[in-house]
Image: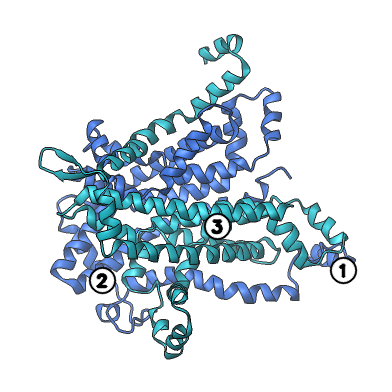
Amino acid sequence: MMSRSLFRREVSLRSREALHGYGFILIWVVGFALFTFLPLVETFRYSVNQVTVTATSINLDFVEWANYTRALFTDPNFVELLVGYTIETLVSVPIVLIFAMLIAMFLNLKFRFKGLFRTIFFLPIVITSGPVIKELTAQGAASAPGIANIPAVIEFLEQLPRALRSPVEYLLTSFILILWFSGVQILIYLASLQKVDRSVYEAAAIDGASGWEIFWKVTLPSLSTATVVNAIYTIITLSHFSENKVIQYIYARTYDVHGGIGYASALAFIYFGVMVVLLGLVYFFLMNWARRGSR
Amino acid sequence: MSRNKFRRLSGVRNRGINPRGFHVSQIKFYVLLMPLAIFMLLPIIFVISNAFKPPDELFAYPPRFFVTSPTLKNFSDLFSKMSTSGIPVSRYLFNSILITLVTVAASIIVSSMAAYALSKKRFKLKKTLFAVNNVALMFVPIAVTIPRFLVIERLNLLDSFWVHILPVLAMPVGLFLLKQFIDGIPDEVIEAAQIDGASDWRIYWRIILPLIQPALATIAILTFQAAWNNADTSSLYLNNESLRTFAFYLSTLTSTTTGANAVAGQGIAAAAALIMFLPNLLIFIFLQSQVMSTMSHSGLK
């Protein structure tokens, strides 16, 4: 406290504010640097090395990009898993967003037992992480594989062009799972729906806008920021989901004899790159849309 | 209800946007929401009913959803297994509870303070720090396990109680969500408080925190789960058995049994999953009212 009174006299307002800012963020920066950022840099170093672990030390052999080329051009599984992940994410994100938006708009209306419904739709937050989803996937209850074996469905899938087949099949079998990822997203949408000024709706209604028009011209544009946040959050949770196949593959490779940590680190960085591209795509697409919407 | 009825009759109704009270027109919401709501509840019902299933039902094909002849055998198996191990269960439970409480409280404070600074303060590194956080957000946590081990070793944190808490304090997802919520608080509120002579700490404590309560409760639920279900820390960074967590303990019980007796192992795993899940559900029920009730106040109006 004493130092503050000193600063008040000698330091300009701006740098005082900056100092307070650093003060508030300091603990976080230290923790983040030590336990997340440093390890990240270290992981990158591993990814361009052949890493061998002995009982006493870790030996690094610089191999340039060998781990990366092996992952992309030699490894028979990894690229396929990545493509599968990309398709699944691109299918899931719009569904989660639309579902969350619809549910949030319903829950923002006034009707009885609204609180109860809100609670129930927020429940996925305790389902998708932790023991429940593990138990569910272990029992095979998270997906509905039976659907893909129904003759009519098989026939329908065969009618589809090749490129569309696996996304549609994924959609049919994992629809349940996708919806369970929408807990936090519904909350974010609800919060931003409640920030919309009621008078805007009233003004629109007085000007003779129909409910449909109000949705497209008022509600949707005001949800654009929330949509971007939700899209990012959805991609992140989907890609960090513990039952995600790419993650399990990377995890298994970490303890492989051949390649081991170095190779797994390279895999992680490639996965990270794909995620960045996905996020970039979604972000670009949504930002464009948001700008058009607000015009 | 009578007030609502009055409003409806007198035409003072927010037409089309906010129907008040119950009205026949609302039935369509229930028709739509009910099935979806039941659908959301299914996994929880499944986990509960699974824990009471006898072996033949657990392995039934096709798997049945509800238990038909509930039994407590899975639990008694689990408890008898517990009583044969060296360290009392209460030790693990105590560790887990203490670790979870400290982690949740500390990480909420650290993340929300950082989020406040990133959202409302002006300083040079602000944009860079948030960008770095977003990068970390995208990175697979398991890939940094080994380097993190080395850092922990160098800091002499191996085999200490703090290794459970310190590494998870700076949670990137938490900062990301909290910053988005604080961004939604108008600057005018903070400026008004500054003009009234409120210090930074006071603004943070008295204005920011109450306004982002839904987000805080969400983060609390997420951190609680991460801490409570965390078995990795115990197996990776700890050799001292008495510092390990309940989650780790249960995972050893279920994994050793699957080798010896796969059938009994499944039952024990189902019972353990329910026991692990219950605190999550409790904390959810406890905190969800925070999430829901304060939501309408988060803003200016």
Which residue appears at 84% of the width and 61% of the height?
A205
The answer to whether residue A76 shows anywhere in this view is yes
| Mark 1 or 2, nearer chain start | 1
Going by the numbered disc 1, the residue's amino acid type is Leu
In the rendering, what colour is chain B? blue
Query: Relative to residue B209, is residue A90 depicted above or below?
Result: below
Question: Please, which chain is the residue tagged with disc 2 on?
Answer: B
| B115 relative position to B253: left or right | right
Residue B268 image point, x, y percent: 25, 67
In the rendering, what colour is chain A? cyan
Going by the numbered disc 3, the residue's amino acid type is Gln
Marking on residue B267: 2
Which residue appears at 44% of the width and 68% of the height?
A177
How far is disc 2 from disc 3 in space, using C-alphas? 34 Å
Q: Secondary structure at mark 1?
A: helix
Hey, which residue is sitting farthest left in the picture?
A55
In the image, A166 versus B157, the foreground residue is A166
In the image, A250 versus B33, the foreground residue is A250
The C terminus of chain B - image quarter: top right
